Image (cartoon, rainbow, N blue to C red):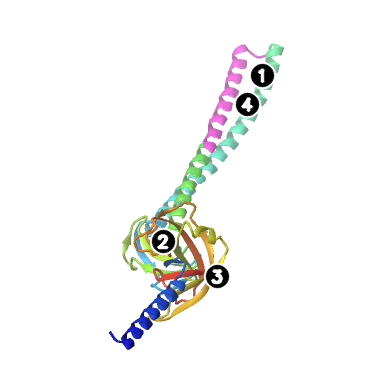
Amino acid sequence: MNKYQVVTLVFVAFALSFTSCKEKDELSDAYGNFETTEVIVSAMANGQLVQFNLEEGDQLKAGQMVGLVDTTDLYLRKLQLQSQRQASLSRLTSVNAQLAVNRQQLQNAQNDQKRIHQLFEDGAATPKQKDDIDGAVSLIVAQEAATRSQIGSINNEAEAITRQIDQINEAIRKSAVINPIEGTVIGKYVEAAETVNFGKPLYKIGDLSSMDLKVYISGSQLSQFKIGEKVTVLYDRNADENNQLTGIVSWIATSSEFTPKTIQTKEERVDLVYAMKVRVSNDGSIKIGMPGEIKINH
């Protein structure tokens, strides 16, 4: 081996060593994947989905109605219950009329009772006449009490029907598919005109305006991070370049876990790591599941 070859090999070895050190210095502090809070919206009623107005990628607002399960049977049942309640309450008219008659009869009987009692004291009425009028008054009082009890029974019946109507109204309310959070439709599982059952998933929605990069750090790195701290977040722009933005540590696990197979950490062969989430704003370029990494700013 001549002198030129030796010099060349030394230069190459130095270059490789320098490159390796540089790459090592540029290693990020933690690696992971982007995720967001996802909500699966399910059907709250049984029946045909007569309306379902959304597609994957749609932006929805919280409280927005996006679908409707057929409520025809519920509505007809509600009309039937309303008729039953009205029929029950209409009986109150005849009961009140009967009470008015009872009250008049009682007043007349009590007037006769006073006169006969006075005659009896004066010796002008027989004991039988006194007993007859007392019995007549007692009978009318009993009749009035029986008639008055019908009012409570009718009111209880009408109240029970009202509670059934309330249940129907609640079922009708749940037949409407109301979007729970503001976000982007991530997945759509059914189409309009399909029959759905209670609990059947209809679509998935998530807020993509901000994302969480879930990374894993070793125990020796744990002291370097705290909630609320700003870190540099990197994710692929292309094969050779990264996009860079600032993230904030939003959560750190309180207990360790074994390293997930798909996750790398700064240290090799780390058995136990701590999960951590870094919140970043998303302009639409970050997708769920996309890999990312972080560097400590200090």
Disc 1 target residue: 116
At label 4, which amino acid type do we have? Ala
Please state the horizontal and vertical placement of residue 295, each as a whole percent of the image. 50, 70
Q: Which residues are magenta?
A: 124-152
Is residue 143 on the magenta stretch? Answer: yes
Is residue 5 or residue 217 the one in the foreground? Answer: 5
- Mark 1 surroundings: few (<14), some (14-19) or many (≥20) residues within 10 A: many
The tag earlier along the polypeptide, 2 or 4, is 2
Query: Viewer-nearest of labels 2 and 3?
Result: 3
Dot 4 falls on a residue whose secondary structure is helix
Q: Are marks 4 and 1 in contact (CB under 8 Å)?
A: no
At label 3, which amino acid type do we have? Asn
Disc 4 target residue: 109
285 lies left or right of 125:
left
Please state the horizontal and vertical placement of residue 47, each as a whole percent of the image. 34, 59
Q: Quadrant of the N terminus?
A: bottom left
Query: Viewer-nearest of labels 2 and 4?
Result: 2
The tag earlier along the polypeptide, 4 or 3, is 4
Please state the horizontal and vertical placement of residue 97, each as a whole percent of the image. 56, 40
- Mark 2 surroundings: few (<14), some (14-19) or many (≥20) residues within 10 A: some
Is residue 134 on the magenta stretch? Answer: yes
At label 2, which amino acid type do we have? Val
Residue at (40% x, 75% y) in the render: 20
Disc 3 target residue: 297
Please state the horizontal and vertical placement of residue 291, each as a whole percent of the image. 40, 70
Q: Are marks 1 and 3 in contact (CB under 8 Å)?
A: no
Dot 1 falls on a residue whose secondary structure is helix
